[in-house]
Amino acid sequence: MADIDVDLEKIHDERLKRFRILVCVDGSEESYRGLNYASECGARRDADIILLYVRPIDQGLRTGGLQVRVARENMLKWGLELPGIQYLKKGLEFLKDSGNLGDDWDEKTTHTEIKGDPLGDNKTEYKNKDGKVIVLKLKTASTVAAGILDQYELGPYNMIIMGTSGRWGGWTKAFWDPAVAEKVASHAPCSVLITRDLERGKGYLMCTDGSEHSREMIVKAGEFSLRTDSQVSVMSVALDVESEDEARNNVDEAVVALAKIGIEPKETFVRVGNPIEEIVDAGSEYSIIAVGDTGKTGLKRFFMGSVSFRVLEQANNSVMVVR
């Protein structure tokens, strides 16, 4: 048992040195747009991409027998239309086409027993000589949100990417549901990108309020933008005319922080008015709106209705909560 704990600790420490992206796929067009972003962001040798499909416990798989045995042998060779497997296969093909998966990869498939479900958790891991890893994970959980958050604990990850228009294996609720997207964005310890009609090439809009968490967000979001070679712009919102100078100072501080990591913003500006409305309006011209969290714990973030999470809820395009 001690040897197992040492091995897990070693794996965890090795993963901390990597840039790890968890992409939640469900077969929707939006989830593959998120995968496209992940493919760009994870193109470097130090980055790993994990594709995740979460399905309800025992989703029509009580037959056991041959199905379970085949599933355990090799997830990608299932001759069955098991829930989610076709979506993961499509994601794998996408990564092959994008050049992220060549021929020289070691393949390993593992199975984990889940009480009350004959299929359990299954994953196929691809690893090349440089240590780069791509994983396809079919995960079983009581809810989609619980499955994603539990997967983080098995990570860790630098970023979770989720599309907003998912079906999630027959779940009756739309993907944009406080029990799924908002809950994950609220509770995940890492940055979360919620994609809506994600159109690459329009850059990041970074929103700063001058707080410590906001300054940290600017640097981290800037590092993300470097990975995708994206332009960035910086804005701040003043509540009234008297606060414009303070908002401008917030922007200037952000520009200095970005300069330290080699980024010169395409544009900077200040708006006056309601922060949520102004950010949502300005952000519509960009690929991604980047906002920081409140610095509070998950439950407090969830119930306090901070600017960041109101933007996440109301924006018509993609929003990244950076932490």
Image (tube, helix red, strand yellow):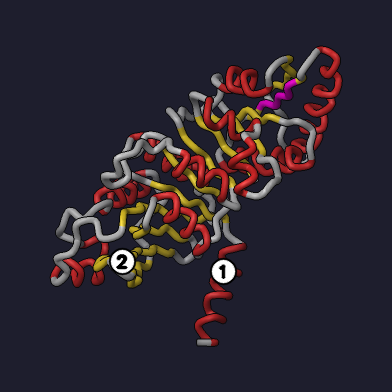
Q: Which percent across, then down, holds residue 54? A: 36, 53
Total count of labels: 2
Question: Which secondary structure lies at badge 1?
Answer: helix
Q: Which residue carries the number 2 mark?
A: 120
**Residue 100 or 196: which is nearer the viewer?**
196
| Tag shown at residue 12 | 1
Q: Where is residue 61 in the image (x, y as percent from the top left)?
A: 19, 61
Q: Looking at the picture, which amino acid does disc 1 mark?
A: His
Side of 257 relative to 146 (left or right):
right
| Image point (44%, 44%), residue name | 180
Provide residue 251's location: percent of width, then percent of height: 78, 27
Q: Is residue 111 visible?
A: no
Q: How crowded is mark 2: few (under 14 residues within 10 Å), some or many (20 or more)?
A: many
Height in image: 170 above or below 198? below
Can you name the residue that lies furthest to the top here? 241
Q: Is mark 2 on a helix, strand or loop?
A: strand
Q: Which residue is drawn at 57% across and 37% down?
A: 320
Q: Residue type at mark 2: give it.
A: Gly
What's the mark number on residue 150? none
Q: How far apart are marks 2 and 1 (CA)?
A: 22 Å
- Residue 280 seen: yes
Query: Where 30 falls versus 87 (above or below)?
Result: above
* Front of the two marks 2 and 1: 2
Q: Residue at x 24, y 71 (%)?
A: 73
Please report contact status of discs 2 and 1: CB closer than 8 Å, yes or no.
Answer: no
Residue 234 lies in the magenta-colored region: yes
Residue extent of the magenta highlight: 233-237
Residue drawn at (49%, 24%) of the image: 316
Q: Is residue 155 left or right of residue 90?
A: right
